[in-house]
Image (spheres, helix red, strand yellow):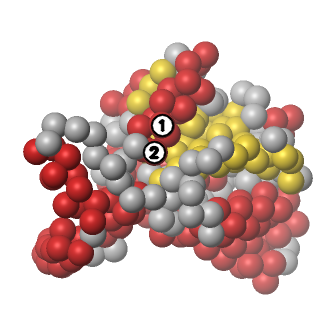
Amino acid sequence: MSTDSNISWQETPSCVRLTLARAEKLNPLDWVTVRELKDAVAKIEGMPGVVAVVITGHGRSFSAGGDLEGYLRLYRRPDEFSAFLDDFFQMLNAIEASSKIYVAAINGVCVAGGLELLLACDLVIAAASARIGDGHLNFGQLPGAGGSQRLPRAIGLLRAKHLILTGNLLSAEEAERIGLVGQVVPDDALDQAVDALVAGLAEKSRVGLRGAKHLTNLTLTTDLATGLKREIEFVHRYATTEPDATEGLVAFKEKRNPVFSR
């Protein structure tokens, strides 16, 4: 493990694990941390062997959101606050646009900016004791890193409004029920569950994973008719030009495990 200021980095041949490492402050997503995450996402994108990236937190929090004391300074410096918001925007957009599969491992409190980070990831596993919500309005703030746009797309407009307007936090079980979390596991089984998920991803076609992420993310930016048309075009190209598509069918016919390109 290496530590680069606010983030610790662990690497295996197919996975990078990024851990927000300011447990004493509940892992705030301040400007320094956001820029470190932005740089990490860019670096990992250039690592061809990496299939998945796990983001989690150290201690009892995934991330409790922004640095409120830091915001007081930024609010008095509009140009700097604009630059901070742009860095946050670019970091989360880079996660969504990445060819890697991003897994949010929610180990504890996940609020405000922490929720916005969760929403940019592809898969979410939560420990049973985790608490998840928006929480901005509890302190007179508004979501400025995509929460007001990604949350309704993830769980529906009325549920999103309920979370944003009330500031309530959900249990992990309730977050799973409404589709904000994909899987809930006992606290002491979180790392094991994440490892199993990543291992399963590593067995799949890399180009297939990238294609599936691209297609599903089209729903964030296109209407249904356009998305359906682009799906047909993309899948036609994939099926007729990518060796992994043919290999999967041949392996099924021959009753063996497919051997995908790496």
What residue is at 69 percent from the left and 67 percent from the top? 43
* Quadrant hosting residue 45: bottom right
Q: Quadrant of residue 184?
A: top left
The N terminus is located in which quarter? top right
Q: Helix, strand or loop at disc 2? A: helix
Quarter occupied by residue 90: bottom right
Q: Are the residues tagged 1 and 2 within 8 Å (C-beta)?
A: yes
Q: CA distance from mark 1 to mark 2?
A: 5 Å
x and y percent of residue 189 in the render?
Answer: 56, 19
In the rendered image, residue 224, in percent from the top left (x then y), is placed at 17, 70
- Camera-nearest residue between 62 and 236: 236
Q: Secondary structure at mark 1?
A: helix
Binning the other alpha carbons within 10 Å of mark 2 as few (below 14), some (14 to 19) or many (20 upward) gives some
Q: Which disc, if any, is residue 202?
A: 2
Residue depicted at 41% across the width and 38% down the height: 200
Q: Amino acid at mark 2?
A: Ala
| Residue 22, horizontal then vertical, whole percent | 83, 41
> Is 84 on the left or on the right of 12, as rendered?
right
Residue 68 in sight from this viewpoint: no
Residue 135 rendering spot, x and y as whole percentages: 59, 44
Q: Can residue 255 be seen from the camera position used here?
A: yes
Q: Residue at x 57, y 37 (%)?
A: 105
User: What residue is shown with label 1?
Assistant: 199
